[in-house]
Amino acid sequence: MDLIVSFAYAVGSVICHQLPERSFFIDGRQLPVCARCTGLYVSGAVGLLGWIAVKFGRGWRGMPPHDAKSASWGPRLAVPPRTALAIVSGAVMPTAISYVTGVTGVWDGSNLTRAALAVPLGVAAGAVVAAVATKDLR
């Protein structure tokens, strides 16, 4: 278990500053990434799982079953690339504004605020990753 925890913190140090004052703590232990990154990764997983649930949930409600000859599983949820780009571009705005206002000293929210403002981007990115993986977005 210690090896897994050490690995998580090592990976976290490559992608995140890990500043204690900008991180969440559970049971007195700092998470391997900051609050903003935590918001991104947790909501990214929610977006990915949400896409899969919608895709396959619709299939369970009378949609045609998976065709072995088709390129994707489940019903087709086609998303045009421009639509996906527009959604991600809009979803990045709360995170970008939070980051820029913090760096410039205009406003620096709490850890909870940083995490919450990262949620739209995380959900959108997770859904896009799932859409690409299920060949609903190319």
Image (cartoon, rainbow, N blue to C red):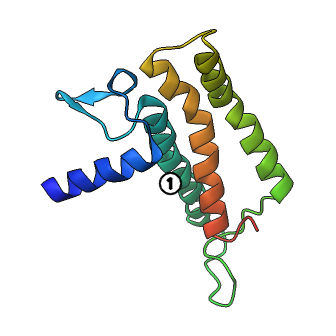
> Is residue 7 left or right of 76 when viewed as pictured?
left
> Which residue, as the protein is rendered here, is positioned at the far left?
2
Which quarter of the figure has residue 32?
top left
Between 65 and 103, the one lying in front of the other is 103
Residue at 17% of width from left, 29% of height from top? 27
Other residues around mark 1 within 10 Å, as few (<14) / some (14–19) / many (≥20): some
Q: Position of residue 91 (x, y in %)?
A: 69, 36
The residue to which callout 1 is attached is 49
The image quadrant of residue 118 is top right
Residue furthest toward the top?
106
In the rendered view of the protein, which quadrant contains the C terminus? bottom right
Residue drawn at x 50%, y 19% as measured from the top left: 113
User: Residue at the spot x=14%, y=53% of the render?
Assistant: 2
Q: Is residue 121 above or below residue 24?
A: below
Q: Which residue occupies the foreground of this view, 115 or 71?
A: 115
* Mark 1 element type: helix
Q: Residue at x 61, y 77 (%)?
A: 65
The percent coordinates of residue 112 (x first, y second) are: 44, 20
User: On screen, 137 above or below 72?
Assistant: above
